[in-house]
Amino acid sequence: MSGVLRLVVAATAAGVVLAALALPAVGGSGAAVLAGTDMLNLRPAALVEPPLPEKTTVYDAEGHQIAQFYAQDRKVVPLARIADVMKTAIVAIEDDRFYEHGAIDIEGTARAMVKNLASGNISQGGSSITQQYVKQVLLNSAASEKEKNATLEASYTRKLKELRHAMAVEQKYTKDQILERYLNIAYFGAGANGVESAARRFFGVSAADLNLAQAATLAGAVQDPNTTSPDRGKQARDLLLRRRNVVLDRMAGLGRITQAEADAAKARKLGYKGVKEPNGCQESRYPYFCEYVRHELLADPAFGGTRRQREQTFALGGLKIHTTLDPQAQQAAEAAIKKRVFASDRALAAEALVEPGTGEIKAMAASRRFGTSGKNEISYNAVADKAHGGLAGFQAGSTFKTFTLITALKQGMKIDDGITAGAGYTAPAYSTFKNCAGGNAGDPSWTVTNDEGSPGFKTLETGTWDSVNTFFMELQQRVGLCRTVETARSLGIKRADGTKLREVETFTLGINESDPVTVAAAYAAIAARGTYCAPLAITSVTGRDGKATDYKPRCERELDPEVADATAYVLSGVLTHGTMRGVGGLGRPAAGKTGTTDGYASAWFAGFTPDLAGAVSIGDPRGSQRYKLTGVTIGGHYYGSVQGASLPGPIWKDTMTAALRGVAPARFTPVNMERFGGCDEDCAPARRDQDDATAEAPLDDDEPFLGDEVDQDPFLDEEATEEPPGR
């Protein structure tokens, strides 16, 4: 085809399209235009405009931002919060007749179409701002790579589709509304979507505060944001600088600014700052709590029927999530751990604080940073269970003895009732212990011993204070394994890995792996006089539509309040008379239980006041059974063995002291001595005044009493070649 003929065809085709777009199809004189419109199907086609992806922001209990998530870094702002010079710059360079034409700029499109047809390919755009907006909407709505490629395809079919949508958009919105939507959807490079995020990412200012040079830079960036993305190096920044100057010249040429203003702006450096916007829990100040919140939302059916739908809701963003995190408590936990356990240590310490009566998680901290890019980081939630980003956790040790104590009190035993405990305990028969399915769980081939401590008559008090293994084996035999397991379950106890609790004879010795959040919530139920509240991290979520969903505590009365009071009474003696007496109390009513596992694989402390409960664990994440806490240096101090009172106890004490600073001390409800005082059999009760619960032991914190009994479990000996029956 000759050049002349090609131009004739081009002009004819362009004329048909332009006529169809430019003239109304009404009356007799519009018949020919209507025919052209019908032929090309150039009628307005409604554009589906899904909400733009925005940031989701997470706040602590005081309203401070602690994290944000986004699939696209964008903050939608109204046109009134965008500098006038930015509006002027983008219109000048992208569509200077924007406020004069309809869905299509006839002059620009005619010029582009003639050139494209003459050259035989698509070499010039000519798209209006409205058309560009349509293209961005279609691109953002694409659900697959195939759909995205179709949106970017250089074809007249695609162009005509965009034109039909543009016609509908022009009918639906005012010009200012279209410009606002375009500036909020456009991609500017460097990961910035929308003019507000671009202004902050490029220059560290809001879109309302952009100056002439900055506005011209952003206006120039939208043409080819990947090529001119300033984070890609000097060459890209040089291209962006040249593009900025083109915009300034264009603005001057159109009379939007003076030539002197253009020259002054062109003399300025690019000024790119590359301000980074945190994204995700890894960049949060409180990553473990953040991970807990994220997993809570991804499991909540309110945000979608399937996990995939919930992930899409989360990615779409625009949510405002208010949480339970208490900055004072969080700082207290972090400082207490940092003081005693270094990030570079092999051992890993983790702590959770939970409020009695609500289940609100007030703090989650660990000795290592959360992440995958640096040294001394971990990529999982060390404070929580698998359902909240954690792994297997650590064996909880003697902290589980509390559930056997509670079961005994539920069954009517008195505080001074006791049992004669031997130096070792061996189950008389496989049937001595029954799991909750009725199966045998005893193991006559294994003997539990007390590595430290003496055998003899022990009451519920003294056996608990000294954490005597053989006493608790005898006690669990008396009250029943299944009853003990049921008590633990009623207080939210579960394995950290999500599998079923191991219902074996050494259950009371804490052979099940757990996590600090779970254990802290269980102990919080004792402080709340038997009311167990599921751990709660989120108080409300406000959607992008402004509607708020409130999250209330989920609580159930699981223990008789007087049983809980008696349990708190016994456990308060652990701090003043038992394994924690070398560490001492808080100067206010407090109670708790140390936990040390077989062979010092891990160590715990779980304790509470009427106002706050906390649990601390420590173990080696490389494998606690292989890498035990013996002969180790932690926090710059050497430990022959780490027990519950060695590290977890002091961390808990420091945390609680700081977290409760400014909170008036509250007392536990006195134990009903008519019900729980004395003993049913001949006994030698260990007497103490109830006020002992508030006493401080006059010992130095740096010289803890290491009297916690070591709990034993034969199944975790890695040298064993055969698992004993019933385990």
Image: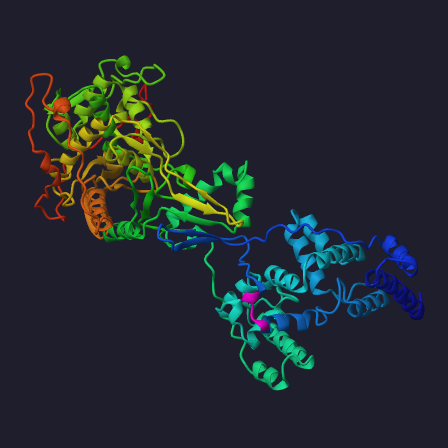
State which quadrant residue 240 falls in: bottom right
Any part of residue 451 in sight? no
At 59% from the left and 53% from the top, the residue drawn is 52
Does the stretch in magenta take in 82? yes
The majority secondary structure of the magenta stretch comes to helix
In the rendered view, would you say 68 is above or below 727?
below
**Residue, far front:** 27
Taking depth in this image into account, of 360 and 198 the one nearest to the observer is 360
Instruction: Answer left or right for 542 relative to 36.
Output: left
Question: Where does the C terminus fall, quadrant-wise?
Answer: top left
Residue sitting at x 22%, y 53%: 636
Magenta span? 80-84
Q: Is residue 664 left or right of residue 686?
A: right
Q: Is residue 257 visible?
A: yes
Residue 489 position, x and y percent, is: 33, 27
Q: From this view, report whether residue 256 is shown above or below residue 317.
A: below
Residue at 17 percent of width and 20 percent of height = 413
Q: Quadrant of residue 242?
A: bottom right
